[in-house]
Image (cartoon, grey):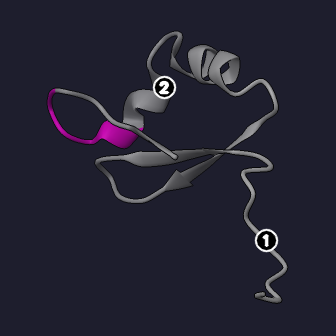
Amino acid sequence: MFVLTKKENGYGESAMACPGVMEKVDRLFPEGFYLLPSSVHECLITRKGGGMDLKGGGG
């Protein structure tokens, strides 16, 4: 899992709109990814198929 944010001026979630950012994230996660807004200051990025059992069931 990665955190997307900005160094300056807060509101780091808006980093998604910065030129080239989403293209770079796409290159880092060619299998696909999920963006999870966590606050106005950051967004979490996790790859698809990250080994999580989304259906539950436990073990």
**Does the stretch in magenta take in 11?**
yes
Q: Are marks 2 and 1 in contact (CB under 8 Å)?
A: no
Camera-side residue: 38 or 3? 3
**Above or below 52: residue 26:** above
| Amino acid at circle 2 | Ala
Other-residue count near label 1 (Cα within 10 Å), few / some / many at <14 / 14–19 / ≥20: few
Q: Where does the image place residue 6, in percent across and percent down from the top left?
A: 27, 29
Q: Is residue 41 above or below residue 24?
A: below
Q: Please tell me which residue is depicted at 39% across the width and 35% down the height of the picture.
A: 14
Give percent across and percent down for residue 50: 72, 51
> Could you tell me residue 48's position as x and y percent?
77, 46
Q: What type of secondary structure mainly makes up the magenta span?
A: loop
Query: Would residue 29 appear left or right of 25 to someone viewing this image?
Result: right
Q: Amino acid at mark 1?
A: Asp
Residue at the image position 84 percent from the left and 79 percent from the top: 55
Left or right: where does residue 51 sit relative to residue 55?
left
Question: Is residue 43 positioned above or below 4 on the image?
Answer: below
Label 1, on which residue? 53
Judge the density around disc 2: few (<14), some (14-19), many (≥20) Cα neighbours within 10 Å.
Answer: few
Disc on res. 14: none
**Element at badge 1?**
loop
> In this rendering, which labeled residue sits more in front, label 2 or label 1?
1
Earlier in the chain: of badge 2 and badge 1, it is 2
Q: Quadrant of the C terminus?
A: bottom right
Q: Give residue 25's quadrant in the image.
A: top right
Who's the residue at 73% across and 64% down the image? 52
Instruction: Based on the picture, tell me whether residue 35 belongs to the magenta stretch.
Output: no
Q: Which residues are magenta?
A: 8-13
Alpha carbon distance from label 2 to label 1: 30 Å
Q: Which mark is residue 17?
A: 2
Q: Is residue 15 left or right of residue 19?
A: left
